[in-house]
Amino acid sequence: MSAPNFVIDVTGITKRFGPKTVVDAVGLQVKRGEIYGFLGPNGSGKTTFIRMLCGLLTPDAGTGTCLGYDVLTQQAEIKCHVGYMTQKFSYYEDLTIRENLDFIARIYDVPDRATAVQHSLDRLGLANRSHQLAGQLSGGWKQRLALAACLIHSPQLLLLDEPTAGVDPKARREFWDEIHQLAADGLTVLITTHYMDEAERCHRLAYLAYGKLLTHGTLEEVMHSIPIFTWTVSGPDLRPLAARLRGQPGVEQVVAFGNILHVSGRDAAQLEATIARLREPRHEWRQIQSGLEDLFISLMDTARDNFA
């Protein structure tokens, strides 16, 4: 491996479809046993990047390794040691849970297949439903089946592409508890998500917008990489106030949160000057700590659309 602790170690990874560059010179290093959150808007290139990592797509440029195998020349070897959970449920809905897991175990030529399938059923709490057709499962149970299928061949790396989309909060929490247990056991996880509470549960984060990597690091490092200043305002007639605020100097975002507005921008002086000019006694203003969502929306708003 290019570095002993790096499960993913790539530089300048690029992918083009016709004239469009959908992943533009992205570099990423992910340590063994790490949960790495991969964030960005729809169409930012996250799924394309993951497919290059697991050997389903070949980069047009760049170099690096995944699990010590070259991402350009050793894709078959990578596929044997990676578990990839796609955005869309991709298993056979007319087969039972057990039959689906047995089929995946056959594909990977898993030794002692029956024992491996039963272990997966027990670990993910699927044993009592093992004879239920996959097509009859709710979103949360389909998610468990997909994760069990990803783990059936004991991979060293999990690539999870928006695995909790459309899943209820309880199922999401249980899923993340399982992911943290897997990481504690030494499995490495790269996960894409649009949920900020999930992003905060990752060891490190990267933010991709329109094919470009804009920031990466721990939550604290990401939050300090680009300063965002946020104020809240409460009181009557917030909707017309929001309309007045939008487009003013220093104001990048005006977002309603229940009975208050969040007003954010990168230029603290300009933002405070605008607030001072529009402040009225009937409104209460207060500066707060910006959140991850404030930062990411700011990054997205200032990034250049590669399909424009």
Image (spheres, rainbow, N blue to C red):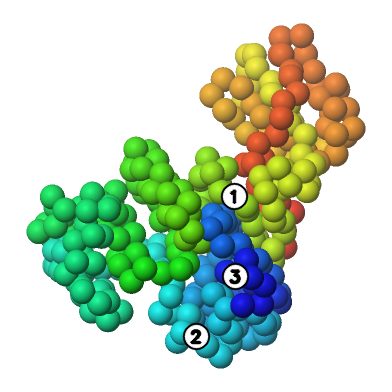
Quadrant of res 249: top right
For marks 1 and 3 on the same chain, the one whose residue lies earlier in the sequence: 3
Residue at (46% x, 84% y) in the render: 77
Q: Amino acid at mark 2?
A: Gln
Q: Residue at x 62, y 66 (%)?
A: 5
Q: Quadrant of the N terminus?
A: bottom right
Decide which of 199, 135 is in the foreground and name it: 199
Picture coordinates of residue 33, whole percent (x, y): 53, 58
Disc 2 target residue: 75
Q: CA distance from mark 1 to mark 3?
A: 15 Å
Does residue 301 appear left or right of residue 54 in this picture? Answer: right
Q: Amino acid at mark 1?
A: His
Q: How many marks?
A: 3
Residue 40, image x, y percentages: 59, 56
Residue at image mark 3: 8
Residue labelled with disc 1: 203
Q: Nearer the viewer, residue 115 or 163?
A: 115
Residue 20 visible (yes or no):
no
